Image (spheres, rainbow, N blue to C red):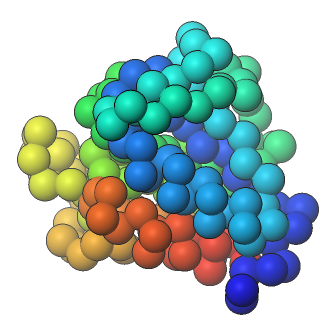
């Protein structure tokens, strides 16, 4: 596999406590780990998070206690539950820290709205799942919506849903590598 040199890379994956999108977490996490990266799963106030399709994941860290200093990239996983982070100042601050340090910030499905609301996508090219108010949020934040499955703009990577999970993970690994 071409990603065999990710040993030592650390990726933080932020999931909603409930109703994260299973494929977006599990397919991406598997790709990162196969590539040799270590993955930490963080969430809000729980030790176990539950996916929309019945998946269960052990949470390694409380999202408010992680530091961008400890990771090379952050991935915000989508699914209906990810709305919990759209206007969360702690998550916004964490995402901004990654950007300020020149690290990778990525989000899939409806989670790119979190980045838009944090002010990170203004004037940037990005994609998002169309619906649930996402395009309104993008327009309000001045985001250049691409409509593509995956969009890379510098160190910011966005994807539009579970069908793009594999391509999304590859894009994160490519920019990380």
> Which residue is painted at 71% across and 25% down in the image?
61
Is 5 placed above or below 49 here? below
Q: Is residue 72 above or below residue 57?
A: below
Q: Residue at x 35, y 67 (%)?
A: 164
Q: Residue furthest bottom?
A: 2
Q: Is residue 13 left or right of residue 33?
A: left
Q: Position of residue 170 (x, y in %)?
A: 54, 75
Residue 19, quarter of the rendered image: top left
Q: Is residue 92 visible?
A: no
Is 75 situated left or right of 9 in this image?
Answer: left
Q: Choose top left, top right, bottom left or bottom right for residue 35.
A: bottom right
Toward the front, the furthest residue is 54
Question: Image height check: is 37 above or below 44?
Answer: below
Kindly identify the residue that appears in the image at 52 percent across and 24 percent down. 49
Image position, residue 104 (x, y; %):
62, 61
Which residue does the image show at 64% across and 16% down from the upper left? 47
Q: Position of residue 174 (x, y in %)?
A: 62, 80
- Looking at the image, which is closer to me, 111 or 53? 53
């Amino acid at each position: 596999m071409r990603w065999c040199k990710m040993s030592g890379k650390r990726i933080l994956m932020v999931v909603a406590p409930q109703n994260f999108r299973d494929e977006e977490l599990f397919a991406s996490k598997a790709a990162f780990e196969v590539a040799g990266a270590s993955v930490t799963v963080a969430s809000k106030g729980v030790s176990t998070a539950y996916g929309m399709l019945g998946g269960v994941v052990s949470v390694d860290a409380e999202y408010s206690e992680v530091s961008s200093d400890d990771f090379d990239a952050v991935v915000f996983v989508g699914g209906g539950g990810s709305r919990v982070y759209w206007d969360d100042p702690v998550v916004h601050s964490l995402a901004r820290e990654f950007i300020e340090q020149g690290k990778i910030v990525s989000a899939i499905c409806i989670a790119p709205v979190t980045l838009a609301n944090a002010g990170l996508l203004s004037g940037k090219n990005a994609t998002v799942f169309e619906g649930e108010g996402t395009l309104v949020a993008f327009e309000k934040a001045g985001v250049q919506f691409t409509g593509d499955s995956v969009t890379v703009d510098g160190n910011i990577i966005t994807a539009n849903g579970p069908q793009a999970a594999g391509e999304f993970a590859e894009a994160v690994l490519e920019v990380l590598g």
